[in-house]
Amino acid sequence: MRKLFIFLTLSAVVFIGGYFYYLPEVRWQNGAQAVGGYPYQIGLTNVIIIPCVTTGYPPICEGGTLCYTLDVARCTGPTGHSDVSGTPSGGMGSNALFLNTAIIQAGLTSGGQLIAGGMSPVLMDSGVLASSGGCSGCTAKSGTTDKFFAWFKKLDKYIIAGFKGN
């Protein structure tokens, strides 16, 4: 019985360690697959995020390099936009505008890296944004590997949160 317990414990440690080792790679693969379906794609490293703000009278949108292309309503509206720039590492361009909610969903931070795709080379708020922290705009897939990682992600949250009733 003791040998079985040790074997199951070691198996669980290896299994969970492998999950956390491959998780960022799987996120990048899913993001790259999602981005590949858009006509305009961008890849950046050493990302700099500059929020767009309205200033002056009459109000205009300012902040990053591309913020002036937005009208005042989209500049700081309910979701707002940010100018994201960095060192090009693939795709077209070195900056684009993203919704602040998409930046948060993707877990993008200054100094990080991203891959994104959209319908416009400047305004990519209707596309996909992926970073090592996650993906915004990616859709779920039905492959066996994706189902397994989705199931294990739910299990992972349960393990970390603790057991029910405690």
Image: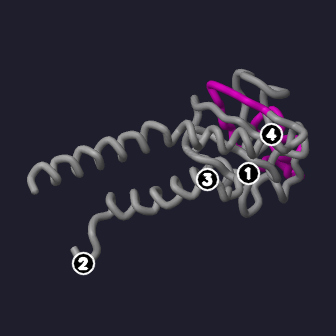
Q: Earlier in the sequence, mark 2 or mark 4?
A: 4
Residue 52 visible in the displayed image: no
From the image, tell me which residue sits under label 4. Answer: 36
Residue type at the position of mark 3: Gln
Tell me if mark 4 has few (under 14), some (14-19) or many (20+) residues whose alpha carbon lies within 10 angstroms of its own. some
Gap in angstroms between the C-alphas marked 3 and 2: 31 Å
Q: Quick check: marks 1 and 4 in contact, CB under 8 Å?
A: no
Query: Residue 165 has which mark?
Result: 2
Gap in angstroms between the C-alphas marked 1 and 3: 10 Å
**Which span of residues is magenta-colored?**
42-69
Q: Earlier in the sequence, mark 4 or mark 3?
A: 4
Report if residue 16 lies within the magenta region.
no
Residue positioned 73% across, 51% down in the render: 99
Gap in angstroms between the C-alphas marked 2 and 4: 45 Å
Q: Which residue is situated farthest in the bottom direction here?
A: 165
* Residue at disc 3, secondary structure: helix
Q: Position of residue 143 (x, y in %)?
A: 64, 54
Residue positioned 28% across, 65% down in the render: 162
* Residue at disc 2, secondary structure: loop
| Numbered disc in front, either 4 or 3 | 4
From the image, tell me which residue sits under label 1. Answer: 99
Q: Quick check: marks 1 and 3 in contact, CB under 8 Å?
A: no
| Numbered disc in front, either 1 or 2 | 2
Q: Quick check: marks 4 and 3 in contact, CB under 8 Å?
A: no
